[in-house]
Amino acid sequence: MQLIDGKAINLQMQAEILQQVEEMVKNGQKRPNLAVIQVGDDGASTTYVNSKIKTCHAVGFESTDVRFPADITEAELLAKIAEINADPNVDGLIVQLPLPKHISENKVIEAIDYRKDVDGFHPINTGRMAMSLPAFLPATPAGIMELLARYNIETEGKECVVLGRSNIVGTPISLLMSRKSNPGNATVTICHSRSKNLKEICRRADILIVAIGKPEFVTADMIKPGAVVIDVGIHRLPSTETQSGFKLKGDVKFDEVAPLCSYITPVPGGVGPMTIISLLKNTLLAGQHKIYE
């Protein structure tokens, strides 16, 4: 069993992006600029936003940090998005989710200029991805593909089972794994809350990608020996083992599943570090005009 080290790949990619940014500056181009909008003061969202801003600076990007109170109106938020869309100095724009209930997430996602949509959530980017056209890919699925590529994990002709059908992870990763590419060319089954015979389906998987949102849902009796397991879940659970009183767990019962695997991502330190770096890779591509001229 080999651990897939997302932290190490994140650092490799940071160095690669920084090198490209310095080349851009040397050639008289501007540094890529990522704008991040946060609404409200949700603790988890603040942590994510601060981490994105910090990593921006680590790779030589500029950042535009916009924070609004939770009671901002939808119209005010949409007006700010329109302003950033029109700003030629900003290459990428993300609005941190979730948003307060009085603001429509769909309206906000569709308001972002798809050429600056480095989260890869806009319907134009989603549609282009489904058609295997150049597009900004959603960060977590893109990060998973990067891990598979950098660990030289064979995907062609393999049976891949995806647990979860969200628009953020499950559905896009199923598309990416099935399309003509490397990694890709897998035979993909996507499972969800209505799927029957779940254990039997999972036991067929050469590659099992788990994004079901339930802590330690996947157990040893769901694993084919030698399978590759990618655990997207992250949950903060009470624990007597740590000083903080909490421990981070994934959607996979790691201790009993890991011995059966050829490769597995740990939680934390597996898929998580790949999400932010994939977002910054999209921002670099936006700054270089490599997806949309």
Image: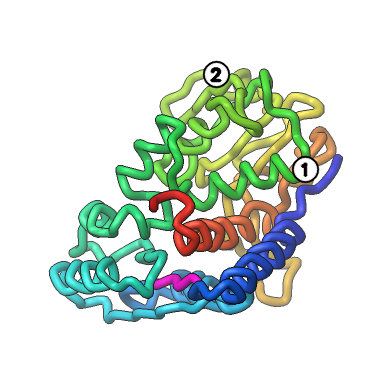
Residue 28 painted magenta: no
**For marks 2 and 1 on the same chain, the one whose residue lies earlier in the sequence:** 1
What residue type is disc 1 on?
Tyr
The answer to whether residue 247 of the structure is visible from this angle is no
Picture residue at 81% right of the left edge, 28% below the top: 226
Q: Residue at x 30, y 43 (%)?
A: 123
Q: Nearer the viewer, residue 228 or 62?
A: 62
Q: Residue furthest front?
A: 27
The x and y percentages for residue 234 are 58, 55
In the rendered structure, which amino acid carries the disc numbered 2?
A: Asn
Quarter residue 43 falls in: bottom left
Mark toward the viewer: 2 or 1: 1
Find the magenta span and give its range: 31-35
Secondary structure of the residue carrying numbered label 2: loop
* Residue topped by disc 2: 197
The magenta stretch spans residue 33: yes
Crowdedness near tag 2: few (<14), some (14–19) or many (≥20) residues, C-alpha within 10 Å? few
Whole-Å distance between the Cαs marked 2 and 1?
31 Å
Image position of 27 with respect to 114: above or below: below
